[in-house]
Amino acid sequence: MSSVKVAVRVRPFNNREISRECKCIIQMSGNTTAITNPKADPNTKDAQKNFNFDYSYWSHDETDPAFSSQLLVYKDIGEEMLQHSFDGYNVCIFAYGQTGAGKSYTMMGKQEDGQEGIIPQICQDLFTRIRNNSSPDIKYSVEVSYMEIYCERVRDLLNPKNKGNLRVREHPLLGPYVEDLSKLAVMSYQDIHDLIDEGNKARTVAATNMNETSSRSHAVFTIFFTQQRADSTGAKGTRLKEGANINKSLTTLGKVISALAEIASKNKKSKKADFIPYRDSVLTWLLRENLGGNSKTAMIAAISPADINYDETLSTLRYADRAKQIVCKAIVNEDANAKLIRELKEEIQKLRELLKQEGIDVCEAKEALGYYEKKNKNTPYWWDEEIDTAIKQKKQKYEQYLSAKNRYKLV
Protein backbone atom coordinates (compact mmCIF):
# COMPACT_ATOMS: atom_id res chain seq x y z
CA MET A 1 0.00 0.00 0.00
CA SER A 2 1.16 3.54 -0.72
CA SER A 3 -0.21 7.04 -0.26
CA VAL A 4 -1.06 9.34 -3.14
CA LYS A 5 1.98 11.47 -3.99
CA VAL A 6 0.95 15.15 -3.93
CA ALA A 7 2.69 18.15 -5.50
CA VAL A 8 1.69 21.82 -5.74
CA ARG A 9 2.77 24.13 -8.56
CA VAL A 10 2.24 27.90 -8.74
CA ARG A 11 2.26 29.58 -12.15
CA PRO A 12 3.31 33.13 -13.21
CA PHE A 13 0.79 35.99 -13.33
CA ASN A 14 -1.36 35.96 -16.46
CA ASN A 15 -2.21 39.09 -18.48
CA ARG A 16 -5.43 39.70 -16.56
CA GLU A 17 -3.66 39.56 -13.21
CA ILE A 18 -0.85 41.81 -14.42
CA SER A 19 -3.32 44.42 -15.73
CA ARG A 20 -5.07 44.43 -12.35
CA GLU A 21 -1.73 44.79 -10.54
CA CYS A 22 -2.33 41.72 -8.42
CA LYS A 23 -0.09 40.79 -5.51
CA CYS A 24 1.51 37.38 -5.03
CA ILE A 25 0.08 35.58 -1.99
CA ILE A 26 2.05 32.33 -2.36
CA GLN A 27 5.43 31.60 -0.78
CA MET A 28 7.36 28.34 -0.99
CA SER A 29 10.27 26.98 1.01
CA GLY A 30 11.39 23.41 0.47
CA ASN A 31 8.26 21.25 0.44
CA THR A 32 6.19 23.84 2.33
CA THR A 33 3.65 26.06 0.58
CA ALA A 34 2.30 29.14 2.41
CA ILE A 35 -0.70 31.24 1.41
CA THR A 36 -1.37 34.75 2.76
CA ASN A 37 -4.90 36.05 3.25
CA PRO A 38 -4.94 39.52 1.61
CA LYS A 39 -7.90 40.63 3.73
CA ALA A 40 -6.69 39.41 7.13
CA ASP A 41 -4.74 41.36 9.73
CA PRO A 42 -1.05 40.37 9.33
CA ASN A 43 -0.78 39.95 13.11
CA THR A 44 -3.53 37.33 13.39
CA LYS A 45 -3.30 33.55 13.01
CA ASP A 46 -5.58 33.71 9.95
CA ALA A 47 -3.07 35.82 8.05
CA GLN A 48 -1.07 32.85 6.73
CA LYS A 49 -1.66 29.12 6.36
CA ASN A 50 1.10 26.57 5.75
CA PHE A 51 0.83 23.23 3.93
CA ASN A 52 3.43 20.48 3.52
CA PHE A 53 3.49 18.36 0.35
CA ASP A 54 5.81 15.87 -1.33
CA TYR A 55 6.84 18.65 -3.71
CA SER A 56 6.25 22.42 -3.86
CA TYR A 57 7.11 23.82 -7.30
CA TRP A 58 7.86 27.54 -7.60
CA SER A 59 7.17 28.35 -11.27
CA HIS A 60 6.07 31.96 -10.67
CA ASP A 61 9.25 33.75 -11.74
CA GLU A 62 11.55 32.27 -14.37
CA THR A 63 14.44 34.51 -13.27
CA ASP A 64 14.30 33.15 -9.71
CA PRO A 65 17.07 30.60 -8.91
CA ALA A 66 14.40 28.42 -7.27
CA PHE A 67 12.31 28.32 -10.47
CA SER A 68 10.83 24.88 -11.22
CA SER A 69 10.92 24.00 -14.92
CA GLN A 70 8.85 21.49 -16.87
CA LEU A 71 11.84 19.15 -16.86
CA LEU A 72 12.21 19.30 -13.06
CA VAL A 73 8.54 18.42 -12.55
CA TYR A 74 8.94 15.46 -14.90
CA LYS A 75 12.18 14.29 -13.25
CA ASP A 76 10.52 14.24 -9.82
CA ILE A 77 7.14 12.75 -10.71
CA GLY A 78 7.10 11.47 -14.30
CA GLU A 79 10.27 9.37 -14.13
CA GLU A 80 9.19 7.64 -10.91
CA MET A 81 5.74 6.83 -12.30
CA LEU A 82 7.24 5.53 -15.55
CA GLN A 83 9.48 3.19 -13.55
CA HIS A 84 6.42 1.91 -11.68
CA SER A 85 4.82 1.12 -15.04
CA PHE A 86 7.88 -0.90 -16.11
CA ASP A 87 7.57 -2.75 -12.80
CA GLY A 88 4.04 -3.77 -13.83
CA TYR A 89 1.86 -1.35 -11.86
CA ASN A 90 -1.09 0.76 -12.99
CA VAL A 91 -0.08 4.42 -12.82
CA CYS A 92 -2.08 7.65 -12.72
CA ILE A 93 -0.97 11.28 -12.82
CA PHE A 94 -3.70 13.91 -12.69
CA ALA A 95 -3.84 17.69 -12.38
CA TYR A 96 -6.28 19.44 -10.05
CA GLY A 97 -7.13 23.12 -9.76
CA GLN A 98 -9.36 25.99 -10.85
CA THR A 99 -9.77 27.05 -14.48
CA GLY A 100 -6.63 28.78 -15.76
CA ALA A 101 -4.39 27.54 -12.92
CA GLY A 102 -1.95 25.80 -15.27
CA LYS A 103 -3.18 22.21 -15.39
CA SER A 104 -2.98 21.81 -19.18
CA TYR A 105 0.46 23.42 -19.29
CA THR A 106 1.81 21.06 -16.62
CA MET A 107 0.34 17.97 -18.26
CA MET A 108 0.68 18.78 -21.99
CA GLY A 109 2.86 21.89 -22.17
CA LYS A 110 3.72 23.56 -25.46
CA GLN A 111 5.36 22.31 -28.65
CA GLU A 112 8.56 24.20 -27.92
CA ASP A 113 11.92 22.96 -26.68
CA GLY A 114 11.87 22.78 -22.89
CA GLN A 115 8.13 23.51 -22.72
CA GLU A 116 6.83 19.94 -23.09
CA GLY A 117 4.56 18.72 -20.30
CA ILE A 118 4.60 15.49 -18.33
CA ILE A 119 2.66 13.45 -20.90
CA PRO A 120 4.96 14.12 -23.90
CA GLN A 121 8.06 13.60 -21.75
CA ILE A 122 6.75 10.28 -20.41
CA CYS A 123 6.04 9.12 -23.97
CA GLN A 124 9.51 10.15 -25.13
CA ASP A 125 11.18 8.39 -22.22
CA LEU A 126 9.02 5.28 -22.68
CA PHE A 127 10.23 4.70 -26.23
CA THR A 128 13.81 5.65 -25.33
CA ARG A 129 13.83 2.91 -22.69
CA ILE A 130 12.26 0.42 -25.09
CA ARG A 131 14.84 1.28 -27.75
CA ASN A 132 17.74 0.99 -25.30
CA ASN A 133 16.63 -2.39 -23.99
CA SER A 134 19.30 -4.92 -24.93
CA SER A 135 17.40 -8.07 -23.98
CA PRO A 136 16.06 -9.99 -27.01
CA ASP A 137 13.75 -11.97 -24.71
CA ILE A 138 11.48 -9.02 -23.90
CA LYS A 139 8.84 -7.77 -26.33
CA TYR A 140 6.88 -4.54 -25.92
CA SER A 141 3.59 -3.23 -27.25
CA VAL A 142 2.18 0.28 -26.79
CA GLU A 143 -1.36 1.49 -27.49
CA VAL A 144 -3.00 4.82 -26.66
CA SER A 145 -6.46 6.30 -26.23
CA TYR A 146 -7.51 9.93 -25.74
CA MET A 147 -10.95 11.01 -24.54
CA GLU A 148 -12.74 14.20 -23.58
CA ILE A 149 -15.43 14.50 -20.91
CA TYR A 150 -17.59 17.52 -21.72
CA CYS A 151 -20.87 18.15 -19.87
CA GLU A 152 -20.74 14.54 -18.62
CA ARG A 153 -20.56 13.23 -22.19
CA VAL A 154 -17.56 11.18 -23.35
CA ARG A 155 -16.03 11.92 -26.78
CA ASP A 156 -13.30 9.98 -28.57
CA LEU A 157 -10.61 12.53 -29.48
CA LEU A 158 -8.83 10.02 -31.74
CA ASN A 159 -12.05 9.48 -33.69
CA PRO A 160 -13.76 12.92 -33.63
CA LYS A 161 -16.15 11.92 -36.42
CA ASN A 162 -17.96 9.80 -33.86
CA LYS A 163 -20.07 12.55 -32.27
CA GLY A 164 -22.07 10.14 -30.12
CA ASN A 165 -21.79 9.89 -26.36
CA LEU A 166 -19.64 6.86 -25.51
CA ARG A 167 -20.88 4.80 -22.58
CA VAL A 168 -18.93 3.98 -19.44
CA ARG A 169 -19.14 0.30 -18.53
CA GLU A 170 -17.99 -1.76 -15.56
CA HIS A 171 -15.66 -4.73 -16.15
CA PRO A 172 -15.87 -7.33 -13.32
CA LEU A 173 -12.07 -7.54 -13.04
CA LEU A 174 -10.59 -4.42 -14.64
CA GLY A 175 -13.15 -1.91 -13.36
CA PRO A 176 -14.65 1.05 -15.29
CA TYR A 177 -13.90 1.47 -19.00
CA VAL A 178 -15.30 3.37 -21.99
CA GLU A 179 -17.09 1.19 -24.52
CA ASP A 180 -16.01 1.55 -28.19
CA LEU A 181 -13.20 3.99 -27.34
CA SER A 182 -10.44 3.92 -29.99
CA LYS A 183 -7.22 2.24 -28.87
CA LEU A 184 -4.47 2.77 -31.45
CA ALA A 185 -1.14 0.96 -31.65
CA VAL A 186 1.93 3.21 -31.80
CA MET A 187 5.50 2.36 -32.74
CA SER A 188 7.33 5.58 -31.80
CA TYR A 189 7.07 8.83 -29.87
CA GLN A 190 6.34 10.64 -33.13
CA ASP A 191 3.22 8.49 -33.57
CA ILE A 192 1.99 9.57 -30.13
CA HIS A 193 2.95 13.20 -30.77
CA ASP A 194 0.85 13.25 -33.94
CA LEU A 195 -2.14 11.62 -32.20
CA ILE A 196 -1.98 14.05 -29.26
CA ASP A 197 -1.81 16.96 -31.71
CA GLU A 198 -4.88 15.71 -33.59
CA GLY A 199 -6.72 15.04 -30.34
CA ASN A 200 -5.98 18.50 -28.96
CA LYS A 201 -7.39 20.11 -32.10
CA ALA A 202 -10.66 18.24 -31.51
CA ARG A 203 -11.01 19.39 -27.89
CA THR A 204 -13.68 21.83 -26.75
CA VAL A 205 -11.94 25.17 -26.15
CA ALA A 206 -13.35 28.61 -25.28
CA ALA A 207 -12.18 31.90 -23.79
CA THR A 208 -12.76 32.63 -20.09
CA ASN A 209 -11.78 35.45 -17.76
CA MET A 210 -8.94 33.30 -16.47
CA ASN A 211 -7.71 31.85 -19.76
CA GLU A 212 -8.12 32.96 -23.39
CA THR A 213 -7.90 29.36 -24.62
CA SER A 214 -9.39 27.50 -21.68
CA SER A 215 -10.07 23.77 -22.08
CA ARG A 216 -13.78 23.57 -21.32
CA SER A 217 -13.62 19.85 -20.60
CA HIS A 218 -11.65 17.11 -18.86
CA ALA A 219 -9.16 15.08 -20.86
CA VAL A 220 -7.89 11.58 -20.09
CA PHE A 221 -4.92 10.28 -22.08
CA THR A 222 -4.21 6.58 -21.53
CA ILE A 223 -1.17 4.50 -22.46
CA PHE A 224 -1.65 0.72 -22.56
CA PHE A 225 1.89 -0.58 -22.12
CA THR A 226 2.65 -4.32 -22.14
CA GLN A 227 6.00 -6.07 -21.77
CA GLN A 228 6.29 -9.81 -22.29
CA ARG A 229 9.18 -12.23 -22.06
CA ALA A 230 9.58 -14.46 -25.09
CA ASP A 231 10.36 -17.49 -22.92
CA SER A 232 7.39 -17.09 -20.61
CA THR A 233 3.61 -16.88 -20.78
CA GLY A 234 3.70 -14.05 -18.22
CA ALA A 235 3.10 -10.46 -19.18
CA LYS A 236 3.15 -7.27 -17.22
CA GLY A 237 1.12 -4.25 -18.27
CA THR A 238 0.25 -0.82 -17.11
CA ARG A 239 -2.01 2.03 -17.78
CA LEU A 240 -0.93 5.63 -17.40
CA LYS A 241 -3.78 8.07 -16.91
CA GLU A 242 -3.55 11.82 -16.88
CA GLY A 243 -6.51 14.09 -16.27
CA ALA A 244 -7.22 17.83 -16.29
CA ASN A 245 -10.21 18.67 -14.16
CA ILE A 246 -12.89 21.44 -13.85
CA ASN A 247 -16.49 22.26 -12.85
CA LYS A 248 -18.94 19.47 -11.85
CA SER A 249 -16.38 16.69 -12.04
CA LEU A 250 -13.98 18.83 -9.99
CA THR A 251 -16.62 19.17 -7.30
CA THR A 252 -17.23 15.43 -7.28
CA LEU A 253 -13.49 14.76 -7.34
CA GLY A 254 -13.18 16.96 -4.27
CA LYS A 255 -15.94 14.99 -2.54
CA VAL A 256 -14.22 11.69 -3.38
CA ILE A 257 -10.89 12.99 -2.06
CA SER A 258 -12.54 14.17 1.17
CA ALA A 259 -14.39 10.87 1.67
CA LEU A 260 -11.26 8.77 1.08
CA ALA A 261 -9.19 11.00 3.37
CA GLU A 262 -11.82 10.71 6.10
CA ILE A 263 -11.77 6.91 5.85
CA ALA A 264 -7.96 6.86 6.00
CA SER A 265 -7.93 9.13 9.07
CA LYS A 266 -10.19 6.75 11.03
CA ASN A 267 -7.37 4.17 11.22
CA LYS A 268 -9.90 1.43 11.86
CA LYS A 269 -12.23 -0.77 9.85
CA SER A 270 -15.89 0.02 10.11
CA LYS A 271 -18.43 -2.77 9.95
CA LYS A 272 -20.54 -0.61 7.66
CA ALA A 273 -19.00 0.14 4.27
CA ASP A 274 -18.34 3.86 3.71
CA PHE A 275 -19.95 5.41 0.65
CA ILE A 276 -17.63 7.03 -1.89
CA PRO A 277 -19.49 9.04 -4.60
CA TYR A 278 -17.40 7.78 -7.53
CA ARG A 279 -20.37 7.53 -9.89
CA ASP A 280 -21.56 11.09 -9.31
CA SER A 281 -19.45 12.12 -12.31
CA VAL A 282 -17.93 10.35 -15.31
CA LEU A 283 -14.42 11.56 -14.43
CA THR A 284 -14.39 10.16 -10.89
CA TRP A 285 -15.97 6.92 -12.07
CA LEU A 286 -13.20 6.40 -14.62
CA LEU A 287 -10.54 7.35 -12.06
CA ARG A 288 -12.00 5.10 -9.35
CA GLU A 289 -9.13 2.59 -9.31
CA ASN A 290 -6.64 5.47 -9.26
CA LEU A 291 -8.20 7.00 -6.13
CA GLY A 292 -7.78 4.48 -3.33
CA GLY A 293 -7.63 1.42 -5.61
CA ASN A 294 -5.16 -0.55 -7.71
CA SER A 295 -2.80 2.20 -8.80
CA LYS A 296 0.33 4.21 -8.07
CA THR A 297 -1.07 7.74 -8.15
CA ALA A 298 0.32 11.28 -8.20
CA MET A 299 -1.71 14.49 -7.96
CA ILE A 300 -0.42 17.87 -9.11
CA ALA A 301 -2.38 20.78 -7.64
CA ALA A 302 -2.08 23.81 -9.93
CA ILE A 303 -2.63 27.19 -8.26
CA SER A 304 -2.71 30.89 -9.12
CA PRO A 305 -0.36 33.28 -7.27
CA ALA A 306 -2.82 36.20 -7.39
CA ASP A 307 -4.61 37.71 -4.40
CA ILE A 308 -7.88 37.91 -6.38
CA ASN A 309 -7.97 34.09 -6.48
CA TYR A 310 -7.36 33.57 -2.75
CA ASP A 311 -10.53 31.56 -2.04
CA GLU A 312 -10.09 29.18 -5.01
CA THR A 313 -6.38 28.71 -4.28
CA LEU A 314 -6.99 27.97 -0.59
CA SER A 315 -9.67 25.43 -1.56
CA THR A 316 -7.24 23.68 -3.93
CA LEU A 317 -4.54 23.53 -1.24
CA ARG A 318 -6.97 22.04 1.27
CA TYR A 319 -8.07 19.31 -1.15
CA ALA A 320 -4.43 18.57 -1.97
CA ASP A 321 -3.69 18.31 1.75
CA ARG A 322 -6.52 15.79 2.17
CA ALA A 323 -5.35 13.78 -0.85
CA LYS A 324 -2.10 12.98 1.01
CA GLN A 325 -4.12 10.71 3.31
CA ILE A 326 -5.54 8.55 0.50
CA VAL A 327 -3.99 5.08 0.47
CA CYS A 328 -3.86 3.05 -2.76
CA LYS A 329 -3.45 -0.73 -2.93
CA ALA A 330 -1.40 -1.23 -6.08
CA ILE A 331 -0.55 -4.75 -7.23
CA VAL A 332 1.65 -5.92 -10.10
CA ASN A 333 -0.35 -6.86 -13.19
CA GLU A 334 0.25 -10.46 -14.23
CA ASP A 335 -1.02 -12.71 -17.02
CA ALA A 336 -3.77 -15.02 -15.67
CA ASN A 337 -2.19 -18.25 -16.99
CA ALA A 338 1.24 -17.34 -15.66
CA LYS A 339 -0.27 -16.54 -12.27
CA LEU A 340 -2.09 -19.91 -12.13
CA ILE A 341 1.06 -21.83 -13.07
CA ARG A 342 3.10 -19.96 -10.46
CA GLU A 343 0.51 -20.66 -7.73
CA LEU A 344 0.34 -24.37 -8.63
CA LYS A 345 4.12 -24.65 -8.54
CA GLU A 346 4.15 -23.06 -5.10
CA GLU A 347 1.41 -25.44 -3.92
CA ILE A 348 3.28 -28.51 -5.20
CA GLN A 349 6.49 -27.31 -3.57
CA LYS A 350 4.71 -26.93 -0.22
CA LEU A 351 3.34 -30.49 -0.51
CA ARG A 352 6.80 -31.82 -1.38
CA GLU A 353 8.20 -30.14 1.73
CA LEU A 354 5.34 -31.55 3.81
CA LEU A 355 6.08 -35.09 2.61
CA LYS A 356 9.78 -34.56 3.21
CA GLN A 357 9.08 -33.54 6.80
CA GLU A 358 7.19 -36.82 7.22
CA GLY A 359 10.25 -38.68 5.94
CA ILE A 360 8.56 -39.85 2.73
CA ASP A 361 10.07 -39.68 -0.77
CA VAL A 362 7.74 -38.53 -3.57
CA CYS A 363 8.31 -41.65 -5.69
CA GLU A 364 7.82 -43.90 -2.69
CA ALA A 365 4.60 -42.03 -1.93
CA LYS A 366 3.01 -43.21 -5.19
CA GLU A 367 3.83 -46.87 -4.42
CA ALA A 368 2.69 -46.51 -0.82
CA LEU A 369 -0.64 -45.05 -1.91
CA GLY A 370 -1.41 -48.13 -4.01
CA TYR A 371 -0.24 -50.43 -1.25
CA TYR A 372 -2.42 -48.83 1.42
CA GLU A 373 -5.44 -48.82 -0.89
CA LYS A 374 -5.02 -52.59 -1.40
CA LYS A 375 -4.26 -53.16 2.27
CA ASN A 376 -7.34 -51.24 3.31
CA LYS A 377 -9.58 -53.50 1.17
CA ASN A 378 -8.19 -56.72 2.74
CA THR A 379 -8.12 -55.53 6.35
CA PRO A 380 -10.69 -57.25 8.63
CA TYR A 381 -13.28 -54.96 10.17
CA TRP A 382 -12.24 -55.91 13.72
CA TRP A 383 -8.65 -54.61 13.40
CA ASP A 384 -7.53 -51.76 15.63
CA GLU A 385 -9.25 -48.48 14.60
CA GLU A 386 -6.03 -46.55 15.20
CA ILE A 387 -4.40 -48.31 12.24
CA ASP A 388 -7.33 -47.35 10.02
CA THR A 389 -7.13 -43.71 11.12
CA ALA A 390 -3.41 -43.57 10.41
CA ILE A 391 -3.93 -45.04 6.92
CA LYS A 392 -6.61 -42.44 6.11
CA GLN A 393 -4.36 -39.59 7.20
CA LYS A 394 -1.49 -40.84 5.06
CA LYS A 395 -3.80 -41.42 2.11
CA GLN A 396 -5.19 -37.88 2.34
CA LYS A 397 -1.71 -36.36 2.17
CA TYR A 398 -0.77 -38.49 -0.86
CA GLU A 399 -4.00 -37.60 -2.67
CA GLN A 400 -3.42 -33.88 -2.05
CA TYR A 401 0.01 -34.16 -3.61
CA LEU A 402 -1.17 -36.09 -6.69
CA SER A 403 -4.17 -33.78 -7.17
CA ALA A 404 -1.96 -30.70 -7.17
CA LYS A 405 0.49 -32.33 -9.59
CA ASN A 406 -2.29 -33.30 -12.01
CA ARG A 407 -3.69 -29.75 -11.93
CA TYR A 408 -0.24 -28.43 -12.79
CA LYS A 409 0.04 -30.83 -15.79
CA LEU A 410 -3.37 -29.74 -17.11
CA VAL A 411 -2.23 -26.13 -17.22
Image (cartoon, rainbow, N blue to C red):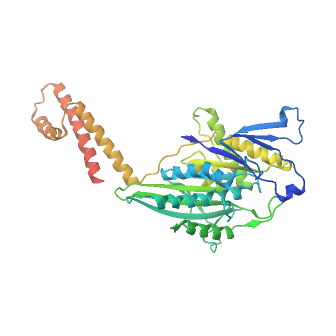
Residue at x 61% of width, y 51% of height? 75
Q: Splitting the image into 4 quarters, where does residue 368 fall?
A: top left
Closest to the observer: 172 or 216?
Answer: 216
Is residue 69 found left or right of 172 in the rendered image? right
| Residue 263 picture location, percent across and down | 63, 37
Closest to the observer: 234 or 168?
Answer: 234
| Residue 143 picture location, percent across and down | 52, 64
Query: Quick check: 205 above or below 370?
Result: below
Q: Splitting the image into 4 quarters, where does residue 380 fall?
A: top left
Closest to the observer: 357 or 109?
Answer: 109
Query: Quick check: 170 above or below 352?
Result: below
Query: Quick check: 98 above or below 212?
Result: above
Is residue 262 found left or right of 1 in the rendered image? right
Is residue 322 found left or right of 366 in the rendered image? right
Q: Judge whether residue 136 can be spotted in this image.
A: yes
Q: Judge whether residue 224 can be spotted in this image.
A: no
Residue at x 79% of width, y 37% of height? 49
Q: Splitting the image into 4 quarters, where does residue 275 fall?
A: top right
Residue at x 85% of width, y 41% of height? 37
Identity of the residue furthest to the bottom in this view: 161
Residue at x 59% of width, y 37% of height? 272
| Residue 53 picture location, percent across and down | 68, 41
